[in-house]
């Protein structure tokens, strides 16, 4: 009887196996590629922390929706491989990620990856500036844990933000590496697609891992607002990257500016080039590293930058609408808590914004969950009075007591959840349940605000994203306090590697010769 049962089981297994093979003829020869990655910029100079829910993670087939080039089954790249999406999460920049959140997301990632082993390749999409409680190199830790599941026969292609950090561990454990070449990041999705295309080409050609990986640390640490590729020297520096990738022996090259608002040993600029031609890889890496170092004194802020008092005075004297004023120190898109009330408090005390016929101003934005509750009770047209802000970061100013008329209410936003506009004098303050950056004209018009016809628009941001940049009548960046203070020389660094430019302006020229990173194994 046992033999009969055993024989039956074997027959069933054989039938299922043959059936599966028969049903996958079209995909049998396609590479098996997993997709995963977690991304965030985390300021260690902010008291805020980031939880798991902030990553708005996609799981399984939903991961395809994150990438514009993979959304439809008919998309060219969708047809080039068998894909096994695991977990893809990307959080709004913020404070350090809790260890609990990191461990939970990593467990889900690893459990998902285990389900479809083995893989020929893995597309690893990260930011590169995540900070996690108790870890110095989260992305390095992440990829090592992933290697523990997928093994070293799997080719990993990594895409990063140019404001990420490339540690030696990350460089060693990955095989193909690329990053964005524009700041603002108008080429973000293009760069992710390039990383996947590189991976598919290496798998289909049978070439696999590149023979050489050059890694050069450059002791420069600059804020993104000084390294925009819109202006020099960033524009010319980054224009040198693509020509290197056209060399026969080079697959890809990148310049990482690094992330200035975390105090970790890995925080500094890096040049990385990968390819099969040793001399081409070496020459490209050393040329890019030297070019960056030679240009270090030329980096300036992308727009006029003034102390707040001078910035607001300049804005009030201008007749160009809208005059954009960047409240930089608490920029949530760089890692600020987003609820510092210092600038709003200063604005509310300016008489010009209280008088009839005075300048009009939109302030975007400040979290105020208590005011939101009151606004939902009274509705549009009602009066509210409540404290807001400074629940996370109260180092520079206390919560603000805001009193005014509710002119708009909107619910359902992914980040803010609830948005309310409160008009007090000539100032329209956008109050949110949770922090949200305001990057698009629609963000304002959906709240019945007209930024183009407003005298001054204050946004918690650094350099303006393209839509706001194109809308501006004029623009100035204000040096305001917060967790992402642009005057990085006054930040209390203790753990970054020194000497570091511009903190050590008179430092000697560094060794910018290539460091060869061994293949992942």
Image: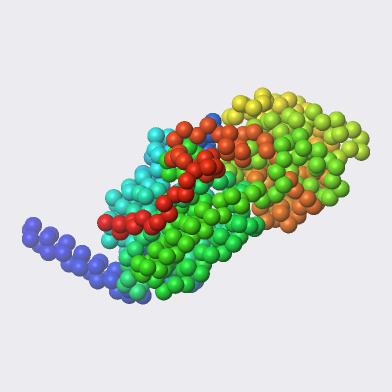
Number of numbered callouts drawn = 0
Q: Name the image colouring.
A: rainbow
Residue ID at (51%, 67%):
242
Compared across the picture, whether 510 is left or right of 17 comes to: right
Q: Position of residue 184 (x, y in %)?
A: 61, 55
Compared across the picture, whether 428 is left or right of 8 comes to: right
**Does the image show residue 342?**
yes
In which quadrant of the rendered image does the N terminus lie?
bottom left
Give the residue furthest to the right: 357
Q: Where is residue 477 in the image (x, y as percent from the top left)?
A: 70, 44
Residue ID at (37%, 50%):
168
Q: Quadrant of residue 307?
A: top right
**Does the image show residue 83?**
no
In which quadrant of the rendered image does the C terminus lie?
bottom left
Q: Quadrant of residue 427?
A: top right
Q: Quadrant of residue 394?
A: top right
Q: Which of 5 and 349 is in front in this view?
A: 349
Residue ID at (32%, 65%):
211
Q: Where is residue 207 in the image (x, y as percent from the top left)?
A: 32, 71
Q: Position of residue 257 (x, y in %)?
A: 52, 51
Q: Nearer the viewer, residue 200 or 87?
A: 200
Residue ID at (49%, 57%):
290
């Amino acid at each position: 009887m046992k033999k009969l049962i055993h024989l039956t089981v074997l027959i069933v297994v054989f039938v299922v196996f043959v059936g599966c093979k028969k049903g996958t003829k079209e995909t049998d020869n396609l590479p098996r590629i997993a997709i995963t990655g977690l991304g965030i910029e985390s300021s260690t100079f902010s008291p805020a922390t980031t939880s798991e829910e902030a990553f708005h993670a996609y799981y399984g087939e939903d991961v395809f929706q994150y990438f514009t080039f993979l959304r439809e089954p008919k998309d060219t790249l969708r047809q080039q491989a068998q894909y096994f999406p695991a977990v893809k999460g990307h959080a709004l920049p913020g404070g350090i990620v809790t260890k609990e959140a990191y461990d939970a997301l990593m467990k889900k990632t690893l459990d998902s990856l285990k389900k479809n082993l083995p893989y020929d390749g893995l597309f690893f999409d990260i930011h590169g500036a995540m900070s996690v409680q108790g870890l110095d190199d989260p992305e390095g830790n992440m990829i090592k844990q992933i290697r523990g599941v997928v093994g070293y026969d799997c080719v990993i292609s990594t895409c990063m933000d140019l404001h990420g950090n490339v540690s030696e561990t990350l460089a060693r454990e990955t095989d193909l590496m690329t990053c964005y070449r524009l700041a603002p990041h108008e080429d973000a999705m293009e760069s992710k697609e390039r990383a996947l295309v590189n991976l598919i080409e290496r798998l289909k050609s049978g070439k696999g891992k590149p023979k050489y990986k050059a890694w050069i640390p450059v002791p420069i640490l600059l804020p993104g607002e000084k390294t925009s590729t819109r202006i020099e020297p960033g524009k010319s520096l980054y224009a040198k990257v693509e020509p290197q990738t056209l060399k026969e022996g080079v697959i890809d090259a990148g310049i990482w500016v690094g992330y200035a608002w975390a105090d970790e040993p890995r925080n500094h600029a890096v040049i990385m080039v990968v390819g099969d031609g040793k001399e081409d890889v070496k020459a490209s890496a050393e040329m890019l590293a030297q070019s960056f170092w030679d240009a270090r004194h030329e980096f300036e802020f992308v727009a006029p930058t003034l102390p707040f008092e001078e910035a607001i005075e300049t804005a009030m004297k201008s007749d160009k609408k809208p005059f954009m004023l960047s409240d930089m120190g608490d920029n949530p898109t760089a890692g600020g808590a987003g609820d510092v009330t210092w600038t709003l408090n200063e604005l509310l005390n300016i008489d010009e914004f209280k008088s009839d016929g005075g300048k009009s101003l939109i302030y975007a934005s400040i979290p105020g969950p208590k005011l939101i509750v009151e606004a939902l009770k009274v509705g549009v047209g009602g009066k509210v009075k409540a404290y807001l802000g400074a629940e996370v970061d109260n180092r520079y100013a206390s919560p603000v007591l805001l009193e005014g008329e509710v002119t708009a209410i909107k619910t359902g936003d992914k980040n803010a959840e609830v948005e309310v506009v409160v008009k007090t004098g000539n100032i329209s303050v956008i109050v949110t349940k949770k922090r949200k950056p305001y990057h698009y004209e629609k963000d304002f018009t959906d709240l019945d605000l007209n930024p183009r016809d407003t005298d001054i628009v204050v946004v918690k941001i650094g350099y303006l994203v393209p839509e706001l940049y194109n809308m501006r009548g004029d623009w100035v960046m204000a040096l305001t306090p917060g967790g992402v203070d642009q005057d990085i020389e006054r930040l209390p660094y203790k753990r970054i590697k020194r000497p570091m430019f511009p903190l050590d302006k008179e430092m000697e020229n560094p060794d910018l010769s290539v460091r060869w990173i061994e293949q992942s194994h």
